[in-house]
Each structure stands twice: as C-alpha cells, then as structure tokens.
Image: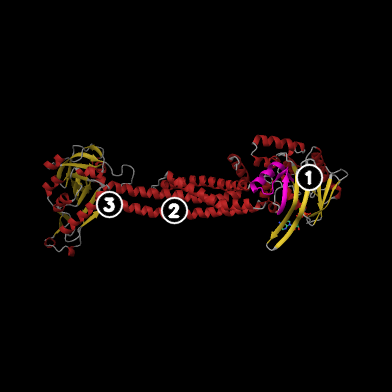
C-alpha cells in the first residue's frame, strides 16, 4: 500500500476547493468562529485568573491575616460597653499565645491601623497610620523606593521615625525630598526615613482589595513608638461628641514557614481565638485558601468554557460534514471517473479528507488570528487584563482540526465506498 | 497460438436487487488477442456494457474466470483492480467523462497521478498526446469550453497516457454527429493499426465493418462471433 505524495494531494484539494470559493468560505466560518471564540474566552478567563492570583499572592500564600471586627453594641455585654469605651478585637494576649502555640510560625506581625491627620508644613491630609514592626515589609512584599524601612532598633528605642507610601510622598512633599523631613502625625513629630513603593508598581490600578486599600498613601511607624506615645485607647471625634475605642491590635499577620502547614496553623489560631473571645470580634483571611478557591473557580470556569467550545466546534464540524456530503454527492461522477482511471478507495478518502483538512486548517488559522485580536481589543477598550497563552492556541487548534477530520471521515468514506459503475452513470 | 489479452471462461454476471435477480451475462467464453479490434453489438439490455465493465475491471464476475494478459484476476482485491485499471486499461466513454474543473492537460494526466508519475513527466506525456490529438492550443481549456469531438479526443488521449494493453470504448461516437464521429473512428483505426487492442461497443452496423471481428449479444449470451473477412488468429 503506497500513498500518493502529500504535496500533490494538497494541490489537488486546493484546486478543488477553489471551485467552490463561496461555499468553502462559508464552511470555514463555522471553524473560524469556533476557534476564535475559544481563544478569546480562554484569554479573558486567563487574564481574570491572573489578576486574582496576583492579588492573593501579594497577601502572601504563607500568611494568615487576622483582623479585629467591631460587633454591634448589644452583643458586647461587657462592663466596658457601659463606660462609653468600645473594647474589642485582637489582644496582645492572643498574639502572645499564637507565638507560643502555633507550630511552624515564622513571624507574627502585629499592626495598629489608625486614621490621623498627617501634616508637612502647610500641607495636611487624613490617612491611615499603621503602627507595626520591621517584619511588615517582608510579609507584605513591598519594595523600598528610598531610604530604609523600620528597624528593630526603632522598635527597641521607640524612635519617632516613619516610612511613607510613595503616593503620600508625592502629595505632601510635592517635589521635595521627604527623607529627613519632619512629619506631624496628629501633632506628634516623626522623621521620615524611607519611602515604600506603590503596591501597583505600574501593573495594576491602585485600588487594591482587602486591606491593601490605599496602601501607598499610608504612613508606617514603629509600634513601640506609638504605644509609648498613645497607648491602646483611641479617641474619635464626630459631630455627636466623641467615642473611645480600645483595640489592642487591629490586625495581625501570622507567617507560617511552609504552605502545607498553613491549614493546621489556622486551626490552632481559631481555637485560641475561640477560647479568648466571647464574641467573634475578629475575622480570619487565609490567602492560601483563597488561592485554592480561585483554582476551584477556575476549574469550573474551564469546564463551562470547554463545553461551550466543544459545542461550537461540533456545530462547526457538523457544518463541514454537511457541506462535504453535498460536495461528495455533487461530485459522484468525478469519483466514478477517478475510480475507473485507477484511483484506489484510499485515494478517494484522502482526496476528500484533504479538502476537509485544508478547510479546517485555514479556518483554524484565521480563527486564531481573530481570537488573538479580540482580547487585545478588549484590553485596549476596557482595560480588562487578558492573557494569550500558547496552550489556548494549541487547544483550540488541535481540537478544531480533530473535530473537522472526525466529521470529514464519514463523507470521504461514503465517497470511497461508491460503486464506480453507478457513480459513472450518475447524472 | 498467441496468449490472448482477454480470456473469459464461463463468465457470468448476475445483479441482485433484493429478491430481484437479473442475469446480465450467461457463461460467456471469449478470447481477444493482441492487436485485435473487436466490436460488440447487440440490442439494448443485452449485456454489452456489463461485459465492458467486467473487461475493464470495474466489476467482479459472479461466476467463471477472467484472465487479463494471462493473469487470472477473478479474485483480485479492489486495490489490485484499481492498479490494473490505471496501468493496463484505457477507457473511452460515450459521454466523455472528463472532470469539469480540470483543464485538458490535467484531465489527460489523471491516470498518471494515481500511478505516482512525477508532475514533470506527466505533463510531458500528456502534452505530447494532446498534441497528437490536435489539442495543442487547447491545453488550458476546461472541458466545457470544448466541442464534443474535442472532448472525446481529450478522453482518448487520457486513455492512451498509460500505454494500456487493452482499450475499451462504450459507444464512443454515440453523442457525436456522423462527421465528428467518423474522425474519432479514424483515430481509433489508427491506434489499432499501431497495434493497440481495442474492444468497442456500438449499435451501428457501418461502424462494425471497420473492425476485424464482431461479437453479437442477445440476453447476455454470445450469439455470433465473426471475423470480418479475416481468419481467426
Ligand atoms: N446495476 C444493475 N442492477 C441491476 N440490473 C442491471 C444493473 N446494470 C445492468 N443491469 C441489467 O443488466 C442487463 C444488461 O445491461 P447492460 O447495461 O449491459 O446493457 P447494454 O447492452 O449495455 O444496453 P444499452 O445498449 O442500452 O447500453 C440489463 O437487463 C440491465 O437492466
Ligand atoms: Mg450500454
């Protein structure tokens, strides 16, 4: 069994297809749309996925984030509620117990997040002041742009120093070098020692999520310094008068050595918190869990997408089969002639299969081009992140070609099985 | 005695359509020798085309044996028969049977394509034959742009391109006026004079006189098998 040279089969197929340009074009449309939609959808999906993954990743997949949450008054039936001081949230005791009982704990980063007026000379604005420890920088993966971050000696001595977000630096200092300047935080003087980079770093719009919100406009000061100056009581003045809040820690970031230990650590932390707190005045966010959920969501998304893609490609394939059946019956006589002149059944199969293959290959190519252009356009117009991956090209392409060949085999087989004598008699 | 190119022994062909059985050929014995020009005659439905299709390896015998060039091909597979058709048989049809989307040259090349002859060689051989058939200035034309006589010349060129040992023609002049038909018949005479073995089906007695031999059919049986003036080889 020999097969005819491929190039000549291709030439023959192209020649035959060019007889029916309109028909060939319309048939290709099915494949074009199929491939195009698959590639476009995959890239939009992949873009959304990356965006979520990046955000979560930035929170640190080895971290456990615990945040104080204010509970409605009637639930906090402690004696402090009567004394106009709302006392809730994470305590130093919690933090101390975490350090003691959570195995594999690498670092514990406590944070107080307070809103204060921040002033440099005549410029003034209200922003979040975060009192924390030097570990903070490493846990949050921020980039230092100038100077240094808080150090352990800052902590030890309670030095009045601060590090400011790059955006705040721009707003307050407007061109001057902030390093070494004195910043007033609610009338306490702090010396600026460093500038910390944007979380966005040019990749994402600045409206980060969760507690990263507005980060680059923050002021970071040593926790020790703040405690020395202000203690744990925080007064907030509004038009009706003042409220006092006593919160020991607003947030706590627990860093675990390895990802596989995170879940166990969360359990321990939860047990400690349940024991120490009568009401649930805290919330736990586990980025690692979020990543897992995002992966699960993505898996589901892929299944849905895969089904849509499969359906659209099957529709395209049926279109091809339909047209090829019509073509075969129209060219019955040609098949008879070719058989009489020495074509074997396999030659006839190859002839029609090659036509199908060329239709679907060129349809696939055009589909890929449009499929790549559409996400670019979406990104250009809406700013939504899209990602073109090679695998989406490969998937769309191989699936479409496979489908076409599968649907092309039946018509080609039918052509080959015709009785040559009857085919020759066909009008 | 020479080895016959065609030898049918007790050849029968029966068509079965459900419960309906039609016997198109009944135990035919026939020999055709190299260089012969034989004409098959008979009423409509007598089995002439059936015989020609069998000789051309387009169909299998129901019973009996068929020896082509001394080789018994009765049990050959479909692929083997295809190969024989492309190498050893030249077909000429009443309705020309050219492929409409191919031009003259390409139509003549078709049998060579299935033999795997290179493009350059195929073009050369097809071109030479086209020239011989007086089609040199029509090579790039499609069949629809040609007259009936020209189309039949293309078909003859195509049947010759593989240098077959047996040429089969089923009423090749049936669709042509008598003048053009005559030209085609003269061409066939010429080929026979060059030594080609030809078997032709016709209804026309005048045409039959051109051949050395006339085989008459009735109801799937040979009723006469005469040599025109010549003696049996
Ligand atoms: N595929 C078929 N199925 C059933 N019967 C058939 C088939 N082909 C031919 N026959 C029958 O076989 C017989 C011989 O047919 P054939 O075509 O050989 O006749 P013919 O001599 O060529 O006639 P004509 O001169 O009209 O062409 C006829 O009775 C015909 O009806
Ligand atoms: Mg007939």
Q: Which residue is mark 1?
A: B32
Q: Which residue is mark 2?
A: A306
Name the subunit of mark 3. Answer: A
Q: Earlier in the sequence, mark 3 or mark 2?
A: 3
Image height of A223 relative to A280, above or below: above
**Quarter containing ligand 1?**
bottom right
Image quadrant holding the C terminus of chain A, namely bottom right
In the image, is B216 to the left or to the right of A373? Answer: right
Q: Which residue is mark 3?
A: A210
Residue B131, given in percent of the width and then of the height, sits at 75, 36
Colour option used: secondary structure
| Most foreground residue, A385 or B9 | B9
Category of crowding for the residue at label 3, using alpha-carbon neighbours closer than 10 angstroms: few (below 14), some (14–19), many (at least 20):
few
User: The magenta stretch spans which residues?
Assistant: B62-91
Q: Quadrant of residue B23?
A: bottom right
Residue A85, given in percent of the width and then of the height, sits at 13, 58
C-alpha distance separating marks 3 and 1 = 96 Å
Category of crowding for the residue at label 2, using alpha-carbon neighbours closer than 10 angstroms: few (below 14), some (14–19), many (at least 20):
some
């Amino acid at each position: 069994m020999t097969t005819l040279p491929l190039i000549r089969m291709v030439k023959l197929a192209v020649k035959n297809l060019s007889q029916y340009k309109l028909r060939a074009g319309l048939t290709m449309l099915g494949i074009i749309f199929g491939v195009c939609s698959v590639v476009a959808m995959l890239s939009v999906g992949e873009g959304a996925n990356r965006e979520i993954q990046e955000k979560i990743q930035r929170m640190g997949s080895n971290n456990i984030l615990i945040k104080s949450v204010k509970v409605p008054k009637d639930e906090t039936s402690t004696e402090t509620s009567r004394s106009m001081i709302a006392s809730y949230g994470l305590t130093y005791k919690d933090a101390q117990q975490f350090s003691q009982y959570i195995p594999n704990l690498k670092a514990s980063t406590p944070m107080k997040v307070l809103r204060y007026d921040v002033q440099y000379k005549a410029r003034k604005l209200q922003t979040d002041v975060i009192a924390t420890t030097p570990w903070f920088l490493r846990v949050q993966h921020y980039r230092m742009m100038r100077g240094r971050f808080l150090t352990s000696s800052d902590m030890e001595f309670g030095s009045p120093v601060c590090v400011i977000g790059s955006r705040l630096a721009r707003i307050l200092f407007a061109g001057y070098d902030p390093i070494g300047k004195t910043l007033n935080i609610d009338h306490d003087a702090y010396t600026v020692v460093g500038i910390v980079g944007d979380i966005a770093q040019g990749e994402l719009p600045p409206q980060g999520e969760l507690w990263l919100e507005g980060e680059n406009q923050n002021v970071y000061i040593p926790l020790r310094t703040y405690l020395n100056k202000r203690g744990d009581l925080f007064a907030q003045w509004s038009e009706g008068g003042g409220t006092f809040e006593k919160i020991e820690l607003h947030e706590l970031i627990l860093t675990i050595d390895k990802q596989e230990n995170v879940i166990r650590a969360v359990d321990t932390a939860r047990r400690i918190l349940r024991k120490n707190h009568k009401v649930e005045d805290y919330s736990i966010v586990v980025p690692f869990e979020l990543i897992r959920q995002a992966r699960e969501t993505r898996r589901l998304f892929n299944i849905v997408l895969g089904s849509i893609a499969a359906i659209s490609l099957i529709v395209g394939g049926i279109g091809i089969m339909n047209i090829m059946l019509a073509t075969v019956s129209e060219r019955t006589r040609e098949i008879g002639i070719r058989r009489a002149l020495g074509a074997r059944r396999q030659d006839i199969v190859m002839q029609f299969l090659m036509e199908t293959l060329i239709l679907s290959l060129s349809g696939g190519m055009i589909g890929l081009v449009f499929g790549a252009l559409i996400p670019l356009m979406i990104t250009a117009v809406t700013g939504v992140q899209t990602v073109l991956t090679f695998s989406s090209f490969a998937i769309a392409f191989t699936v479409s070609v496979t489908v076409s060949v599968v649907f092309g085999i039946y018509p080609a087989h039918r052509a080959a099985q015709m009785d040559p004598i009857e085919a020759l008699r066909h009008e | 005695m020479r080895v016959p190119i065609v030898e049918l022994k007790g050849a029968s062909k029966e068509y079965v359509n459900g419960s309906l059985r039609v016997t198109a050929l009944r135990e035919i014995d026939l020999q055709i020798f190299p260089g012969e020009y034989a004409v098959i005659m008979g009423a409509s439905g007598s089995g002439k085309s059936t015989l020609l299709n069998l000789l051309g390896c387009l169909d299998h015998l129901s019973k009996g044996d068929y020896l082509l060039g001394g080789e018994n091909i009765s049990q050959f597979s479909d692929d083997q028969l295809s190969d024989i058709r492309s190498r050893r048989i030249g077909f000429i049809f009443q309705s020309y049977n050219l492929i409409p989307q191919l031009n003259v040259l390409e139509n003549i090349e078709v049998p060579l394509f299935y033999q795997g002859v290179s493009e350059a060689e195929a073009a050369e051989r097809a071109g030479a034959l086209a020239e011989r058939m007086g089609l040199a200035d029509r090579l790039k034309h499609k069949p629809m742009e040609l007259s009936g006589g020209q189309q039949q010349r293309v078909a003859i060129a195509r049947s010759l391109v593989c240098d077959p040992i047996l040429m089969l023609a089923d009423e090749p002049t049936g669709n042509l006026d008598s003048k053009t038909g005559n030209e085609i018949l003269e061409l066939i005479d010429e080929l026979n004079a060059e030594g080609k073995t030809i078997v032709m089906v016709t209804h026309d007695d005048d045409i039959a006189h051109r051949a050395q031999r006339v085989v008459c059919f009735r109801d799937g049986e040979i009723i006469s098998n005469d040599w025109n003036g010549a003696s049996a080889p």
